[in-house]
Amino acid sequence: MRKKINNLDDKIIIVMNLSTNEQKNKKIGLKGLLVSYFFV
């Protein structure tokens, strides 16, 4: 269970990094955030 939580935290960090990279276009950033969250 602990490993799953840690992996989830890592995925969230990765997703947040992706969204900050796409910060210039907020709509694309939000879509990328949702897509990467559900498919990572």
Image (cartoon, rainbow, N blue to C red):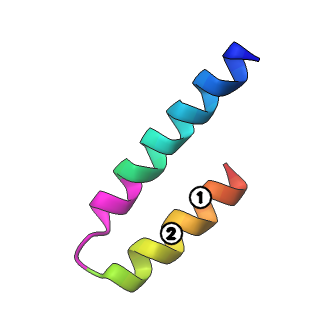
* Image: magenta residue range: 18-24
* Most distant residue in the top direction: 2
Q: Quadrant of residue 39?
A: bottom right
* Residue displayed at 51% across by 43% down: 12
* Disc 1, SS: helix
Could you tell me residue 6's position as x and y percent? 59, 22
Could you tell me residue 9's position as x and y percent? 53, 33
- In the displayed structure, 15 sits above or below 14; it is below
* Disc 2, SS: helix
Q: CA distance from mark 1 to mark 2?
A: 6 Å
Q: What amino acid is labelled 2 in the image?
A: Gly
* Residue displayed at 50% across by 69% down: 32
Q: Quadrant of residue 21?
A: bottom left
Disc 2 target residue = 32
**Image label count:** 2
Disc 1 target residue = 36
Q: What amino acid is labelled 1 in the image?
A: Ser
Could you tell me residue 2's position as x and y percent? 68, 14
Tell me the quadrant of the picture where the N terminus can be found: top right
- Residue 28 is marked as none
Is 39 on the left or on the right of 17, as rendered?
Answer: right
